[in-house]
Amino acid sequence: MSELIKKQVTDAKALMDKAIDHCEGELQKIRAGKASAAMLDDIYVDYYGTATPLNQVGSVNTPDARTIVVQPWEKSLLGPIEKAIMEANLGVNPQNDGIIIRINVPPLTEERRRDLVKRAKGEAETGKIAIRNIRKDANEKIRKLKAEGVSEDEMKAGEHEIQKLTDAYIIKVDVHSEAKEKDIMTV
């Protein structure tokens, strides 16, 4: 295989690694009945007029499996943090005691579990689509190499290599999705 094709395969692999990491991150944000600091990763707090990630204005801890504790660096942020958590619509109720914000994560109902499984499957499908798009782009780049003197056989070998990568990465997405599904459905 020519160096140009090897480079395309390596580039595609790097992009697919990023797609897997992104998919894992999105799946991690879906709560499975257990308290997780990652549940609050997408929450932004109004910090003196600037939308700032929650983990940059205070510490987020999980002292037990059902509780998340947010300790702001400044007491004046208790109200804005509480408001941001409420607006995030996570299905939890923050409790402000004047020093920290405590969030009790309720156990999931069967219906809510099914909704979360659907959401996890949606995230997995988004990950698969991203991987397929990377495959499509890589194959197009390989076909364009014909102008640079790459033979038909080398192009076919490169496309075959990209397809093997695609298949392997789609299996990885399925494994992550199934693990998350099992985690969500476990009472």
Image (spheres, helix red, strand yellow):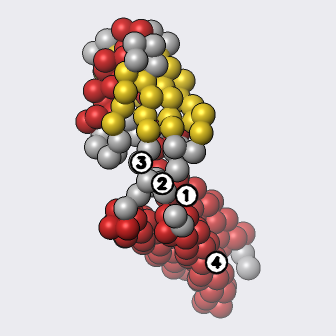
Q: Secondary structure at mark 1?
A: helix
CB under 8 Å between discs 2 and 4: no
Q: Position of residue 184 (x, y in %)?
A: 49, 64
Residue tagged 3:
106
Task: Tell which tag, 1 or 4, sits nearer the viewer.
Answer: 1
Looking at the rendered structure, the kind of residue marked 4 is Ala
Q: Quadrant of residue 15?
A: bottom right
Q: CA distance from mark 2 to mark 3?
A: 7 Å
Determine the residue positioned at 41% across, 58% down. Answer: 108
Residue tagged 4:
168
Q: Position of residue 142 (x, y in %)?
A: 55, 76
Q: Earlier in the sequence, mark 2 or mark 3?
A: 2
Q: Which mark is residue 33?
A: 2
Is any part of residue 144 visible from this angle?
no
Q: Position of residue 153 (x, y in %)?
A: 65, 91
Q: Which mark is residue 24?
A: 1
Looking at the rendered structure, the kind of residue marked 1 is Glu
Looking at the rendered structure, the kind of residue marked 3 is Pro
Q: Earlier in the sequence, mark 2 or mark 1?
A: 1
Determine the residue positioned at 54% across, 24% down. Answer: 59
Q: Earlier in the sequence, mark 1 or mark 4?
A: 1
Q: CA distance from mark 2 to mark 1?
A: 18 Å
